Image (cartoon, rainbow, N blue to C red):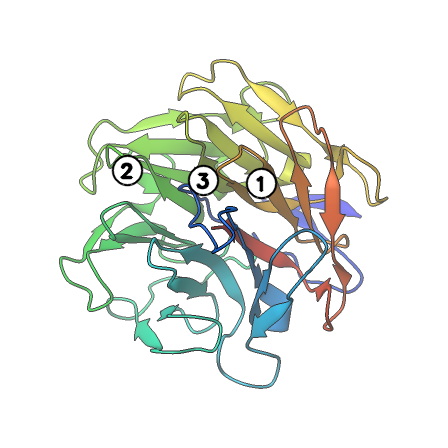
Amino acid sequence: MRFTVGGLLLIVAAAAVLAAARGCRTEPPPEVPTGRPRERIYVADWGNHRVVRIDDMDGTNWTTLGSPGESTFRFPVGVHVDAAGRVYVSEQRHDRLTRIDDLLGTNRTTLPPAGSPRGRPNKFAGSWVFVDDRGRVYRTYDGDHRVERVDDMAGTNRAAFGTEGSGPGRFRYPAGVCADPGGRVYVADFDNFRVVRFDDMTGANWTAYGEYGTGVGQFINPCGVCLDARGRLYVADQGNDRVVRIDDMTGANWTAVGTFGTERRPGLLYAPCGVCVDAAGRIYVTETSSNHRVVRMDDMTGANWTTFGTGGSGRGEFASPMGVFVR
């Protein structure tokens, strides 16, 4: 069942609390000794308070860190893996960013927010993380309606941008974030029903695209964002149960895949949240509501639609998975 209150889409599922994603852009993966590239799939398993890693869409080598009842993570939202293989996790409840060397939790480092959060987080938008090619770390703070960037996990050169509102330089529950090789920042502005781009952390050349609705050029609570190797922008359009791809911030070559559905049939999505594109151009999507799964497709036609996961807390199960990253 779904309904709208005060412009915010609410999605009620029997066994889950809805959440929302961050974006990613992957580099060519490292090679394993056989000479074949290996890409692993990382998922922020929000309701199970853990991060999951699998080798493929069969769930091979299922590995987790964190669990309900212990404090490793509390409602992880975003996940990113840098070029050195270190894993970054943004948490909603603790309002902190964590970096670990591996899923054993080696060399755990945390970065708390600057000062006390000013606003109440939106459980439907979350807080996301992205690491650019220079190693700078970006994070959205949905309750504070801002984006933050630091040079490292010591918080060096911390810069923040944004405040609450709907005009230039303003967000309403910013969600997914990513950056292109030129340093331009892209943000899913969840409750302003748009995506925005700006050149740097001063907000220079602010450009917004989208409005509320179900048609071309329209979004309902966009959540995750990512860029592919060609610079095309992908958006998890959560309230419209679809993934959208545009060539640029004019919306050129708008392409969408997905429609509402809970059956395990190709093309059906329910509240897509995280989105990521791997080095081969395949698209990964998480579904936060009753589907509780990861979807992979070869392209925006939905070719070779593959799903993994179901609701639960065991092996091969998720509870409102949010962020997804492939490296």
Residue at 28 percent across and 37 percent down: it is 169
Nearest-to-viewer mark from 2 and 3: 3
Distance from the alpha carbon under mark 2 to that under mark 3: 13 Å
Counting every numbered tag in the picture gives 3
- Residue with the mark numbered 1: 7
Q: Is residue 85 above or below residue 175?
A: below
Q: Secondary structure at mark 2?
A: loop
Pick whichever, 132 or 3, lies toward us.
132
150 displayed left or right of 112: left
Pick whichever, 207 or 258, lies toward us.
258
Name the image quarter holding residue 203. Answer: top left
Taking the image as drawn, is residue 128 in sight? Answer: yes
User: Could you say where residue 326 lies in the image, as x and y percent from the top left?
Assistant: 51, 49
Answer whether labels 2 and 3 touch (C-beta < 8 Å).
no
Residue density around tag 1, few if under 14, some if 14–19, many if 20 or more, within 10 Å: few
Specify the amino acid type for callout 3. Answer: Ala
Q: Secondary structure at mark 3?
A: strand
Residue at 77 percent across and 63 percent down: it is 311
Residue farthest to the bottom, as pictured: 70
User: Could you say where residue 190 lies in the image, as x and y percent from the top left?
Assistant: 49, 42
Taking the image as drawn, is residue 127 in sight? Answer: no
73 displayed left or right of 6: left
Label whose residue precedes the other's in the sequence (2 or 3): 2
Residue 188 is marked as 3
Label whose residue precedes the other's in the sequence (2 or 1): 1
Distance from the alpha carbon under mark 3 to that under mark 1: 16 Å
Q: Is residue 106 above or below residue 278?
A: below
Residue density around tag 3, few if under 14, some if 14–19, many if 20 or more, within 10 Å: many
Name the image quarter holding residue 7. Answer: top right
Residue 140 is marked as none
Distance from the alpha carbon under mark 2 to that under mark 1: 20 Å
- Residue with the mark numbered 2: 169
